[in-house]
Image: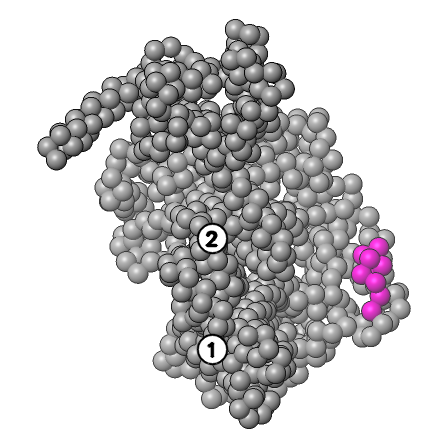
Amino acid sequence: MPNLFNTILTRVRGLRQRARVSRELDDELRFHLEMEAQSHVEQGIAPEEARRRAARDLGGVDQTKEAIRDVRASWVDSVWQDLRYAVRSLRRQPGVGVAAVGMLGLGIGITTAMFTVVDSLVLRPAPFERPDELAFVYMGDDHGGGAVVAPAVLRAWRDIPAFAGVESALPEMALVELDGSVVVRGTALVTPGLFDLLGGVRPVLGRIFEASEGRAGSDDRVLLSEDVWRSLYHADPHLVGRRVSVNGESLVVVGILPSEFRFPAWNTVIWRPIDFDAPAPSRVNERPMAYVRFARDVPRSDALRLATEAARAADGSNAGLRPWVEPLAGLVLDSYSQRAIPLLAGGVVLVFLVLCANVSSLLLARLTARQREFSMRSALGASRGRLIRQAFVEAAVLGALGVAVGVSIGWLLVSVSRALLPEAFLLRTLNPLNIDMRALTATSVASIAATLAAGVLPALIGTRVNAGESLRVIERGGTETRAARTATRGLLVAEIALACTLLVGATLLVRSFINLAGADRGLDATGVLTATMSLPRRDFPDRIARTAAAQLLEEQVRQLPGIHQVAWSYGLPPSGGAISFGNWQSDVPGAPILDMDVGRFSVGPEFFALYGIPLVRGRVFERSDSRSEVVVGERLAAALWPGLDPVGRSFSFGKERFHVIGLVRETHHPALDARLDRPEFYEPFSGVGGYAMMSIRCGVGCPDMALVRRQLVRAHPAVRVVEVRALEDAYFEQLARPRAAAGLGFGFAGIAVLAAAGGLFSVLSYAVGRRRREFGIRTALGATPGQIQRLVLHDGMVVAVIGIAIGTAAAWLLSRALASLQYGVSVSDPSTWAVVLGLLTVTIAAASWHPAREATHADPARLLREE
Amino acid sequence: MPKTEYLQGALDLLILKTLALAPNHGWGIQQRIKQVSRETLSVSQGSLYPALHRLEAAGLVASEMATSENNRKARIYRLTVRGRRRLEAETADWRQFSLAIRRLLELA
């Protein structure tokens, strides 16, 4: 295709060297003139006369130049021309352009940002080598289950060809000590081979664990995340090889891992080696999680069969059990985020659709005006192809500007979420958060397609009709064309339906949040501070030392002003202390065994008074009570002894046996995850342990939390203060994410409703503009302003009612998906619907009001004169 | 002499034929057509130059700025390979066409 190449080259050259071409054309024609004149001279005509005659014979040089330019004009030139025309046309109506670009940009931006987050958190596989081969394994029967894999089974699995690797890890929390202060960080005990199993883990400094590390004698090693290294050790380049204090143990740092590496939990930043095959005696009871890499050449079903056989052979307790496999997804999300994030992403898609529909309807609203323009230009000789191409270029310019704005908004939002969401969302993924190019591409293509469709349609319609006829029709100034009417009203219905759906969803989320925030907690949380301290075994070796320390700490706190009561306990509301899950049985003959998660608090008698938990029956603790005497909450009592008085009865949990001396009001932990709100019972407090928890009631005049912390530190130099916080904040943490979800949801719904209202306003305004003559005639024939207004309002209301009807149906479907995010509210909640319909009605009425008023301003006399 | 109207195809053919003999500038082509046709055919520059540029855009002729014999800047056109092929095809077509016309006229 050398010719095509040459042609393009010539044309591109022609575009770039426009000035030179023009100059050469002048030269060429001047040469012609001079040659002509010269030939006249040679025929004996005087030079002056020859020149004059030559010029006359030559004719119109300008027309020639014009003709040549037409011939030479390449598609590059004419597209350039179209581009300039498009920019001019957009400048003529900057409002439409700015609105369209803004809406496209907003749509692309928020959708891309949301999908970036969703992809990183939910969809993308773990950032390890060949992640599809990696899996988390646990043992269970045919219905599932959650038994961990015993060390003997792990050892057996290493010897079968099913797996390329079998490693273990156990996540926990650790106290990191630094110059007298203590911070809590996520840690994990890992077998040394774990990093090779995952693959691609390269330390920033130092090395990863060697295979021998973790056995007795070499288990005092530690790997730190770059995050910890930077935030706690100021990126000290000489940290590798030095010792740090973790959980009171002195460990040697062997390496620093990149901050992107998080495993097995999203918050794991410290790794210690452990030999789970032959664990140290102190760790025998710890059951790690098993992670495997499937062998590439063994089919998955064969591998599982081999693993089942090996497991049953290695450990008799595995009879009837088989391994269950879960892929290592890109995240270790809690159930709330897993449910909420895809839903919010779905909401974003709806917003995006509304915005695209709105841009389309905005462009289509100009349909009739553009149609007239296109007919005119068609009548003046522009070819249909050229007109359509021009409309295409114009829409493409809009779309391209929208994409540019969208990229900036998306980048901004991702940067903001990177900066603002670290603890709540960002760390919950094993993937780094970078803008998602696929989402950006998809949204950009979709919005450009929407723009093009809406932009080219007027040109298609406008040029299809016979130009002269269409001019005549338009001169008469009719109403909107049918096609335009159908298209814009259809888009508006879609917009209002989507906005309605989003608004219902958002309202349910907001109401759930309000319900959560106002839910009964069963205790008085206001004016309570809690402090958690660590009493290292080194400095407080026995109970006597710890009790003495507790005494000192309590005295220090009581010196502060405004302190009413102080109580020690193990376990603090709302999340409680120990959790026992398993089989519970009451002393009633023939009582069933109940499988429940139960919270256990160890408290003194002052605990109930401090938290305002009322005693229902029996009594609270006395000093003489034995360890097996307990106070139960109402839910546990109702579960174990339905309809009976629990006081004086007993119940068992495994081998433990408890005698009930009292019944107290149930406390609640309002959360979307109902499992967090467990039944509870209280055991007598047996003195402060290594982890000391203090509750402080201080009423209205609570001292500053920093002051409390200082006072506690002053009590004893070896006491490590882990945390001091207001109890309200602890409850509030449960609200943070529902609040964020409600906020985001309402934000999305707000954008959608405003966009739909804007669309309605522009379409109605436009329709009124087109129908002014009709309204004038109606007025002349005796229609009252009220009747004219009703005509316009009716137009808007029909669209709104259809849209809301469709939106309502969609909302019913949506609410099923939302059920898990709702707290104390359902989709049939009348006040939700009152809010939604009220808001939509007000918005739609507001959007129709101005156009309706405009319609009554049609002065028939003036309008008819315009004819 | 009245200006003769002719089909655009004919003008293209004339230009290509003229350039087949030797590269030439616009004025030269005009003069040559006039001479060879014994002043029967006259091409105005308003038709000639757009045609030349159109043929160049179609890749049938190529041009370059050059200095003429009398030291003036002129655009010299020459036939491309594709132009030569087109000339042969068009010549054959034209012969057939004119033969058909002549037969028709002689029969009448």
Q: Residues within 10 Å of mark 1 (few under 14, many from 20)?
A: many
The residue sitting at 45% across, 59% down in the picture is: A375
Color style of the picture = one colour
Which comes sooner in the sequence, label 1 or label 2?
Answer: 2
Taking A273 as reference, is A812 above or below it?
Answer: below
Q: In the image, is residue A708 part of the stretch drawn in magenta? A: yes
For badge 1, the amino acid type reads Val
- What secondary structure is found at the residue carrying circle 1? helix
Looking at the picture, tell me which residue is in the foreground, B79 or A514.
B79
Taking A46 as reference, is A402 above or below it?
Answer: below
Pointer 1: what residue?
Answer: A799
Foreground: disc 1 or disc 2: 2
The residue sitting at 47% across, 18% down in the picture is: B27
Taking A148 as reference, is A249 above or below it?
Answer: above
The residue sitting at 19% across, 29% down in the picture is: B97
For badge 2, the amino acid type reads Leu
- Kindly report the distance in space between the C-alpha atoms of the residues bearing marks 1 and 2: 38 Å
* Label at residue A380: 2
Residue furthest top in the image: B69
* Segment tinted magenta in the rendering: A702-710
